[in-house]
Image (cartoon, rainbow, N blue to C red):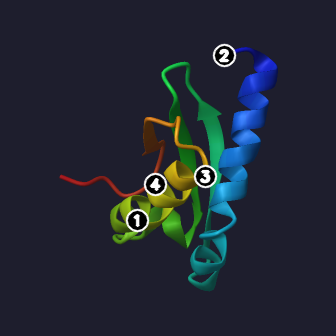
Amino acid sequence: MDAQQKQEMIRQVDDALNAVRPHLAADGGDVEVVDITDDLTVKVKWLGNCENCFMSLMTMKAGIEQAIKNKVPSIKHIEAINGVEVV
């Protein structure tokens, strides 16, 4: 994937996240796209209250992942680079 393709994919993923951002903002949080790797993994960063929220894993699966994969089906994985650790 060249730089232009990557930027376009980041734009599409960011667009997809706009569908869940109002729900995150209602709880004082947000999410941003940090990178998309060559193996089509989206790396996101939790912001605000989402960074320390125990519900962030569920939000990732039920909201973030669904929104991204519906809009950009070529994405293989989504992972947060920060946030609550699940043990």
Do callouts 4 and 3 mark residues in contact (Cβ within 8 Å)?
no
Q: Amino acid at mark 3?
A: Lys
The image quarter containing residue 4 is: top right
Q: Residues within 10 Å of mark 1 (few under 14, many from 20)?
A: many
Q: Residues within 10 Å of mark 3 (few under 14, many from 20)?
A: some
Do callouts 4 and 2 mark residues in contact (Cβ within 8 Å)?
no
Q: Position of residue 79 (x, y in %)?
A: 44, 43
- Residue where numbered disc 3 is placed: 71
Earlier in the chain: of badge 2 and badge 1, it is 2
Q: Amino acid at mark 1?
A: Ser
What is the quadrant of the N terminus in the image?
top right
Q: Position of residue 65 (x, y in %)?
A: 46, 54
Q: Amino acid at mark 4?
A: Glu
Q: CA distance from mark 1 to mark 4?
A: 12 Å
Earlier in the chain: of badge 1 and badge 3, it is 1
The image quarter containing residue 2 is: top right
Name the element at disc 2. loop
Q: In the image, 81: left or right of 4?
A: left
State the mark number for residue 1: 2
- Residue where numbered disc 4 is placed: 65
Instruction: Identify the residue at horizontal 36%, vertical 58% (top origin).
Output: 84
